[in-house]
Amino acid sequence: MQPNKLANAGPLGLMGFGMTTILLNIHNAGFFPLTTTIISMGIFYGGIAQIIAGILEFKRGNTFGVTAFISYGFFWISLVGIWLIPAIGHVEATNSTLVGIYLALWGIFTLFMFIGTLRANRGIQVVFGTLTVLFFLLAVGNIAGNKDILTFAGYVGIICGASAIYLAMAEVLHEQYGRSILPMGEPKTEDKAH
């Protein structure tokens, strides 16, 4: 009898992250206003689905996956809180400088997570590399009050989100077919051995 194989929760977390990131960044790029579509995705798919994926990665013993998915899941929920809690009352809205600092802290965290991807496939490196750039652009844009930087960040965010969606689908198809259908840029064999 074979032991039960745990499913790969990575694609779920990547899709939650990728789709929500694209929606927010088409707003940042100036295409749409901030609406309930983005806020709902931030709570439910970017937030809760990533947290679930992180818990499932815990069961698989994947420290990187746990840290990434649970952290970014709560990033989305906290970001929605920053937007919505002042509307409830009794709490002052956050100024753009403090939002910039918040985003810079996420940028620092993401930079270290990016370093953790350097022995993984190129697909995950692209996701975390573009996410690092995105957070720092958003931080600088908010602190400086520079709309052009924030708009540019939106385009970087669209690329970041699309790369996460691509990687999620590459992983799903790989598991379904037992071989690589969409290339993920696997590391060299000697990289994996160390």
Image (spheres, helix red, strand yellow):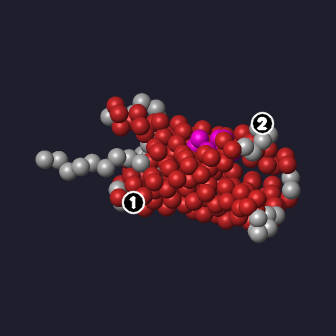
> In the rendering, at what x and y percent does residue 42 appear?
62, 50
List the residue tagged with mark 2: 31
What's the amino acid at mark 1? Phe
List the residue tagged with mark 1: 58
- Alpha carbons under labels 1 and 2: distance apart: 37 Å
Q: Is residue 182 visible to the viewer in this orientation of the structure?
A: yes
Please give left or right for residue 31 compared with residue 70 in the image.
Answer: right
What residue appears at the point 58 percent right and 43 percent down from the top-left corner?
18
Q: Quick one: 113 or 20, which is closer to the camera?
A: 20
> In the rendering, at what x and y percent does residue 116 appear?
51, 59
Q: Which residues are magenta?
A: 18-24
Q: Is residue 116 visible to the viewer in this orientation of the structure?
A: no
Reply yes or no: does residue 165 show up in magenta. no
Q: Quick one: 16 or 84, which is closer to the camera?
A: 84
Q: Picture quarter containing residue 97?
A: bottom right
> In the rendering, at what x and y percent does residue 17 appear?
56, 47
Q: Say if 80 sits above or below 2 in the image.
A: below
